Image (cartoon, coloured by chain):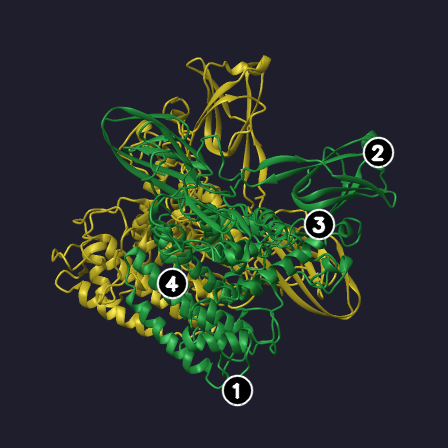
Chain colours: A yellow, B green
């Protein structure tokens, strides 16, 4: 950020504060539903500091969000006043406290300004100040999230049951705007929102409704495709929707000879964008919360759609909160560890050692916290209030479970990677990873079954796909063991199938990376294509082809409990980009990267895949593969189509 | 609180939140001046829980500050709705999140209501909910501090330098209210506030001023006796002051044959009350911050004026913030330890084991924090950003200083006391106290000098009154050593005098407790009587009889930097009540207490001193002492006057 002034704050605090607000956004039938975990807020009281050696006289002005003052070479000045300084040494300290929001400052000046080089001090630790390319202008307020506003006209208006049903033909995340004779003489109407037609028409069970609505009423921002106004004729009401989108650029495109795949990619992209704002959330109707497990997958999709490292980092900061860690992230043991691993995944994307250095103390703190969750043998176990989740499935959770140990082994490896990248000592983490590896193989590998068992305490030797999928996904095994795991478990037709879309992400990845691409493509066509056949305009939290009609919308015992625009449903973007277009970094930050399209599955391709610092364009036509990039440096291709 | 419904919150969070707001209240010449330490805020997200076994059907309603819902036996209800329940088991959970203020609930109902018995859960730890007798009605908001409002007429209006000077004849902590022709046609005026006349008349240096003031403008609440309106004739403006006082009952009175002492007591009481609101602050013009050292003394004054244990506890909670402790309280090592000791002083007042149990985890946490401040020998030393303050004086601070070790020894004793009161293990703390005692005597007691030296590292054998006063004040020495300390140091005429009112509190206490009452009385008459002679309506932060005129108001290099209404200046209330009226608890909570008036210093007395659960009335006339109490239980007197 050198050079340009920005709003600056204590690093992480913007995200922790906005993340708290995000986790308070869930709404259900008129009730607030705060996330059920500990929510940190930003620090309240800071000092920003910097020393200059000024060559010539200059002047500057400090804007602040909060109360405080500026001390320049020992003299106090009010915020907002022009301060003259130089030539010579200038020590600036800005005291800023904000009792409700984010304490932040913006320093305007030719030389003295809030670019890189300021320290943020919370009276305990001084660290380089945080900022965001989202907040670069003095007239902005880091408390206010800036959306792009768009008016959406309904594609159909229908008289139903004496009321008016508006179909916007797409998912809207915003607010209705109305006029019409229905509001004459101060009359008001009721609104019923629906992601589906059935939901909008259901007065009792629709997730959001609004009584006493009129053109003057500002409703909360909500997710909907349909709006139903009971008791009002369509002619009496004009309805448009104001859709608010968070500005993130899509840097990928996918076009092949299979129109269904093209549509799947586009609808997945639309779905994913709607769930990508300041943070990756699970869904726009529900929960609107920031989940580390969902985010872990979103980071991977992001690589192949937007390559926006800022949203990844914002999400990581918000998820973790302040040190010391008080509970498992989202209460879930596996999610804490996915958060930790995601930090080095991020480093793979952009090789930003500064971000790793910022997160390193919190990664160390997380490992200290995890230490309180290890038994005498060093196995990760659940303490009171910890949720050993892994997946919704029949897993033997008596005693420490294998899946958590694999994650912990991977955490040790991630710590070693991060230590190397930030100049810290990697050796203790490498040793711990090696120790964990031996321990896991000794306790959980069942040579006879050729599989990892869920747990060893019960003696049941229970095998699930989930545990073994993670062993492959995190490269815990290779060679003969990996072959046995794939054949005996992942590809087995005898074990219960993975039923959650969350875990199917890992399953499809593992199938793809082990070469079962035809099967993966078939599953994409069937599962996501199935939703399109049901008329989906965004992809759903879950899809079961066996049910019919409005049954599709029910979940968690609630007839409209299912989210119809859910981030993890964007998995095809990742699978297509990573395995079918074959783009992946070989070094951190794509210093070198590979592009290896699997042309045998396509007649033609016309695709763009983002990489760090540019993108790759892939065309394939009549057996000829062209791969070009606007990144002129290191790359290799596997040559022509095969 | 059993029985009556109240607003409930996470214990400590009301005080931590309001304490943060308090520490943001400092204002200087148009600039905000946040306290220069880490300020915690309340938790943002809570669950309140309770289980009932209902005999009959009943109903209840939950009001909440924030967003959330009520779950009654598994069914969700919006806040504010009437919920029917019973007979039988009822599990209530209230989810409440507040992104800016204090999450709090109020449960109205015949049976199901927010009285004692609710648990507050921050998703990490569930503890008995906190509350305050200040917030008992459903229409209240724990975010809003409720003051008693009073209109104060000026006692004099004077034309000065073409402007109007209003003298309210007393200290006001509030806002001006105006009318008059000066505001015709939308005209505005400027206001200059002054604790002193000189300050109000000084356009450049008065602490508070307000430009563009008119009847419509609400100013911030400020401390002033004088208001000056430049350029406006007195006839053109009507000015009154709205004084806001926090409701705390004075439960003491003092009247003797010495009218000067009576006036000193009354002005001290007025001073102290002004600085006693939600919290004990240092002063009402400046700093308005909560300082543990100042508070430690205020707790002692409080015992002899208001006996309001609530303000003590609120102040203790606000000072400490959340665990883990991140820095020395107010950045000062000694203040952290005074905070810790004050918890058991509080127990001496009211024997409230519940409060000690609430604070115990934070006391343990403070001792863990202090452990990071001990050297290899176990001596407390200063780490980066720690302020080894003790007093403003020439002290040998090379290496660990004696005063901090005495405080730490006392902390170990306080931990032992608190452990005994809360059923924890006192033995380790008793052992540590014994060890510290030996260590201090070995390192700091100079047998030849008959004194404690400040430090041993420099080899200078430097002796200050301060170090030795603390040794007496905290009963670290008795017998022959105490006698030598008193005669050789405290009563010495050769050592530099104590110059700060803060430390004179300890000095006067030590003089009084060692029987030098005549000298103490003389000092009270001279120092506090001196301020009265200068026209003080409240007692000042500091008073030097050697200076003249407006020089009295200068401090810290600022012509009006001195606070003219400062809590520690109320010391005579404590000294008179504790040593001259001789009231003190002999058991925690005044289970037994002593009343031993030193009648030899008075011809007559007509005084009331509060004790736990009542008060003591002392009259002395014509050699006859009458001591009565409305507490009928245990007490003894020393009989008649002497």
Q: Which residue is mark 4?
A: B414
Q: Chain of mark 4?
A: B
Q: Chain of mark 2?
A: B
Q: Answer yes or no: are tags 1 and 4 on the same subunit.
A: yes
Residue at position x 57%, y 76% from top?
A: B492
Q: CA distance from mark 2 to mark 1?
A: 69 Å
Task: Classify B281 as above or below A540.
Answer: below
Q: Which residue is mark 1?
A: B459
Image marks 3 and 4: residues in contact by CB distance under 8 Å? no
Image marks 2 and 3: residues in contact by CB distance under 8 Å? no
Q: Is residue A210 left or right of residue B562?
A: left
Q: Chain of mark 3?
A: B
Q: Which residue is mark 2?
A: B235
Q: CA distance from mark 1 to mark 4?
A: 31 Å
Q: Which residue is mark 3?
A: B195
Residue B33 x/y as whole percent: 64, 54
Residue B389 x/y as whole percent: 55, 69
Q: Quadrant of residue B499?
A: bottom right
Residue A115, numbered label: none
Q: Answer yes or no: are tags 2 and 4 on the same subunit.
A: yes
Task: Classify B102 as above or below A333.
Answer: above
């Amino acid at each position: 950020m050198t050079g340009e002034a920005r709003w600056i704050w204590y690093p992480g605090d913007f995200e922790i504060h906005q993340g708290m607000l995000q986790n308070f956004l869930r709404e259900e039938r008129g009730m607030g539903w705060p996330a059920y975990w500990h929510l940190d807020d930003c620090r309240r009281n800071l000092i920003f500091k910097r020393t200059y050696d000024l060559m010539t006289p200059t002047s500057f002005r400090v804007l602040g969000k909060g109360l405080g003052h500026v001390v320049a070479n020992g003299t106090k000045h009010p915020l907002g006043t022009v301060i003259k300084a130089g030539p010579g040494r200038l020590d600036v300290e800005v005291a800023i406290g904000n009792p409700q929001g984010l304490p932040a400052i913006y320093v305007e000046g030719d030389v003295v300004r809030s670019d890189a080089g300021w320290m943020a001090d919370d009276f305990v630790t001084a660290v380089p100040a945080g900022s965001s390319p989202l907040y670069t202008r003095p007239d902005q307020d880091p408390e206010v999230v800036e959306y792009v506003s768009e008016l959406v006209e309904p594609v159909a208006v229908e008289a139903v049951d004496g009321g008016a049903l508006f179909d916007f033909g797409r998912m809207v995340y915003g607010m209705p705007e109305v006029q019409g004779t229905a509001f004459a003489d101060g009359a008001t109407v009721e609104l019923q929102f629906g992601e589906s037609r059935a939901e909008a028409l259901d007065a009792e069970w629709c997730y959001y409704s609004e009584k006493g609505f009129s053109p003057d009423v500002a409703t909360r921002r909500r997710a909907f495709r349909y709006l139903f106004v009971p008791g009002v004729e369509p002619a009496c009401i004009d309805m448009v929707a104001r859709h608010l989108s968070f500005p993130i650029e899509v840097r990928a495109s996918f076009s092949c000879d299979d129109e269904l795949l093209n549509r799947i990619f586009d609808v997945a992209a639309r779905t994913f964008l709607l769930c990508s704002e300041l943070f990756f959330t699970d869904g726009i109707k529900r929960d609107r919360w920031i989940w580390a497990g969902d985010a872990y997958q979103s980071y991977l999709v992001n690589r192949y759609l937007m390559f926006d490292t800022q949203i990844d980092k914002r999400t990581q900061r918000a998820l973790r909160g302040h040190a010391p860690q008080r509970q498992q992230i989202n209460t879930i043991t596996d999610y804490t560890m996915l958060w930790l691993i995601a930090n080095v995944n991020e480093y793979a994307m952009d090789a930003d050692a500064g971000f790793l250095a910022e997160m390193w103390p919190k990664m160390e703190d997380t490992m200290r916290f995890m230490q309180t969750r290890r038994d005498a043998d060093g196995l990760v176990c659940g303490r009171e209030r910890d949720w050993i989740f892994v997946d919704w499935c029949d897993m033997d959770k008596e005693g420490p479970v294998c899946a958590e140990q694999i994650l912990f082994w991977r955490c040790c490896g991630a710590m070693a990677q991060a230590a190397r990248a930030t100049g810290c000592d990697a050796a203790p983490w490498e040793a711990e990873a090696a120790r964990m590896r031996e321990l896991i193989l000794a306790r959980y590998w069942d040579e006879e079954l050729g599989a990892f068992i869920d747990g060893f305490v019960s003696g049941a030797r229970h095998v699930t796909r989930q545990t073994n999928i993670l062993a492959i996904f995190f490269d815990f095994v290779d060679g003969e063991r990996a072959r046995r795991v794939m054949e005996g478990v992942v590809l087995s037709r005898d074990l219960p199938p993975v039923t959650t879309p969350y875990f199917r992400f890992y399953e499809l990845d593992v199938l793809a990376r082990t070469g079962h691409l035809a099967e993966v493509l078939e599953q994409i066509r069937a599962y996501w294509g199935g939703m399109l056949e049901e008329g989906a305009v965004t992809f759903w939290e879950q899809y079961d082809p066996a049910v019919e009609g409005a049954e599709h919308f029910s979940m968690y015992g609630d007839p409209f409990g299912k989210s119809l625009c859910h981030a993890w449903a964007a998995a095809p973007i990742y699978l297509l980009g990573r395995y079918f277009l074959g783009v992946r970094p070989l070094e951190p930050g794509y210093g070198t990267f590979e592009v290896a399209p699997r042309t045998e599955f396509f007649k033609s391709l016309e695709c763009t895949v983002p990489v760090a610092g540019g993108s790759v364009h892939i065309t394939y036509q009549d057996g000829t593969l062209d791969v070009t990039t606007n990144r002129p440096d290191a790359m290799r291709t596997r040559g022509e189509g095969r």
